[in-house]
Image (spheres, rainbow, N blue to C red):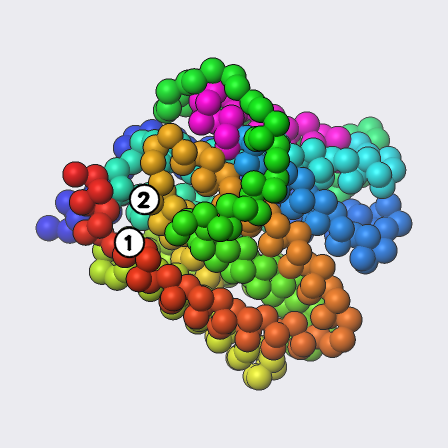
């Protein structure tokens, strides 16, 4: 009796599962280097602030590169732009693994950012191959693959550091080598197995495509501009927390790096489960904007509860709640954008949205670093309050975006 319902839960085009596999492999390649980027930077004699700028350099480069790649994917097709992006990650990580001086490490991170539009291009592929009513489910599972990467990647990072080193490459550098190899696998899968999913218009790139004032101006775009702003605000508050909770966990709760890795894995597992099993039923029952706003409000509450109850047991309970609700906003924003844009511009729209997320990823760590210099709890208090304000902003969008399953069905008809 349950089998048909189980199959229906995963009833998506076969091509979706290929792009989800490619996204998972790419996510693992990305998350392998997250636990080691800071200690690797310290090997080059960088200060804490200089080390944090590696994340900013990547995010700013991604901000400039992603919209252009999204636009090119609309014109040249998704497949080869996705291959180009994955190849860029492979080359950048190989360069980082052999970098002998700090400036070369910055170059590697910037190259990875400039070619790092693979997520937005993969999202455009999903929009090409799914119907509007399938997209909440599809984007939820797609987002879950990224969450799953946060579980697998750090484990592989540890394993990579136990491998015999290659000439000129340190044990930490070996993680970059493994990351490059995994990105190469994703590129080959894309090249040989992913068909083109959109009509090719031929190469046409004008200066206007590089006019990044257009991205800022897109914030004033009717209706969609407010979703770009929501992405930026939600992403900024989240990245403030992402940096700040680590020193809080280590210094206020007196835990160690091993425990921190367990917390990352816990959030990844919960995010994966909630996106796969909870996102679709919720999207069928409630307005998508409502889900975004409520999940952001709960996210803000968890930020405020952490310094209110600064004990390890309370932190774990609060983090469980955070892990469950944190996975909803971004895939649902992508879904709303996809439903409310036409097929010819979805690559560009999702690319612009990724650019706003990249801007938030660049700004958030800098703000968090300044707040951490005050004390370890200040960033959590401040980002908690700001996140509640962002949730209020999302609630105000409800009357403009009545995105639910019925709307999706009607738009498909």
Q: Quadrant of the C terminus?
A: top left
Is 162 positioned to the left or the right of 236 in the image?
Answer: right
Tags 2 and 1 in contact by the CB under 8 Å rule? yes
**Residue wearing tag 1:** 403
* Helix, strand or loop: magenta stretch: helix
Describe the element under mark 2 as helix, strand or loop: helix
Q: Position of residue 325 (x, y in %)?
A: 42, 64
Q: Residue at 84% of width from left, 47% of height from top?
A: 43
Q: Is residue 36 visible?
A: no
Crowdedness of circle 2 by 10 Å Cα count: few (<14), some, many (20+)?
Answer: many
Q: With respect to residue 242, does 332 lie above or below?
A: above
Is 309 positioned to the left or the right of 125 in the image?
Answer: right
Span colored in magenta: 70-96
Front residue of 353/114: it is 353
Front residue of 392/138: it is 392
Determine if the magenta segment contains residue 347.
Answer: no
Residue sticking out furthest to the top: 202
Describe the element under mark 1 as helix, strand or loop: loop
Q: With respect to residue 15, does 372 lie above or below?
A: below
| Quadrant in which residue 194 is drawn | top left
Quote the CA–CA distance across marks 2 and 1.
8 Å
**Residue wearing tag 2:** 339
């Amino acid at each position: 009796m349950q089998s048909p319902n189980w199959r229906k839960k995963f009833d998506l085009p076969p091509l979706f599962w290929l792009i989800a596999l490619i996204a998972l492999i790419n996510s693992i390649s990305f998350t392998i280097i997250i636990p080691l980027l800071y200690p690797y930077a310290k090997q080059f004699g960088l200060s804490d602030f200089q080390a944090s700028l590696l994340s900013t350099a990547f995010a700013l480069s991604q901000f400039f590169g992603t919209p252009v790649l999204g636009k090119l994917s609309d014109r040249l097709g998704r497949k080869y732009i996705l291959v180009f992006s994955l190849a860029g990650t492979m080359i950048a990580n190989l360069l980082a693994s052999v970098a002998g001086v700090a400036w070369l490490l910055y170059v590697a991170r910037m190259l990875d950012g400039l070619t790092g539009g693979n997520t937005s291009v993969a999202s455009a592929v999903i929009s090409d191959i799914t119907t509007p009513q399938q997209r909440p489910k599809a984007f939820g599972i797609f987002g879950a693959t990224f969450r799953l990467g946060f579980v697998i990647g750090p484990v592989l990072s540890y394993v990579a550091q136990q491998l015999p080193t290659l000439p000129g490459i340190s044990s930490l550098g070996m993680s970059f080598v493994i990351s490059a190899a995994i990105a190469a696998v994703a590129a080959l899968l894309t090249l040989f197995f992913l068909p083109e999913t959109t009509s090719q218009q031929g190469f046409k790139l004008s200066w206007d495509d590089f006019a990044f004032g257009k991205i800022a101006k897109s914030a004033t775009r009717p209706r969609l501009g407010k979703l770009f702003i929501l992405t930026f605000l939600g992403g900024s508050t989240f990245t403030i927390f992402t940096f700040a909770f680590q020193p809080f966990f280590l210094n206020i709760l007196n835990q160690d790096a091993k425990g921190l890795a367990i917390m990352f894995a816990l959030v990844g597992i919960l995010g994966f489960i909630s996106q796969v099993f909870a996102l679709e039923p919720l999207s069928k029952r409630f307005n998508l904007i409502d889900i975004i706003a409520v999940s952001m409000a709960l996210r803000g509450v968890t930020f405020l509860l952490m310094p209110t109850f600064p004990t390890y047991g309370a932190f774990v309970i609060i983090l469980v709640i955070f892990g469950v609700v944190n996975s909803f906003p971004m895939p649902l924003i992508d879904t709303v954008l996809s439903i409310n844009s036409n097929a010819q511009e979805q690559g560009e729209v999702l690319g612009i949205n990724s650019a706003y997320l990249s801007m938030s990823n660049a700004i958030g760590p800098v703000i968090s670093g300044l707040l951490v210099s005050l004390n370890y709890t200040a960033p959590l208090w401040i980002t908690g309050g700001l996140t509640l304000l962002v949730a209020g902003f999302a609630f105000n969008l409800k009357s403009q975006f009545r995105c639910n399953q019925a709307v999706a069905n009607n738009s498909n008809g």
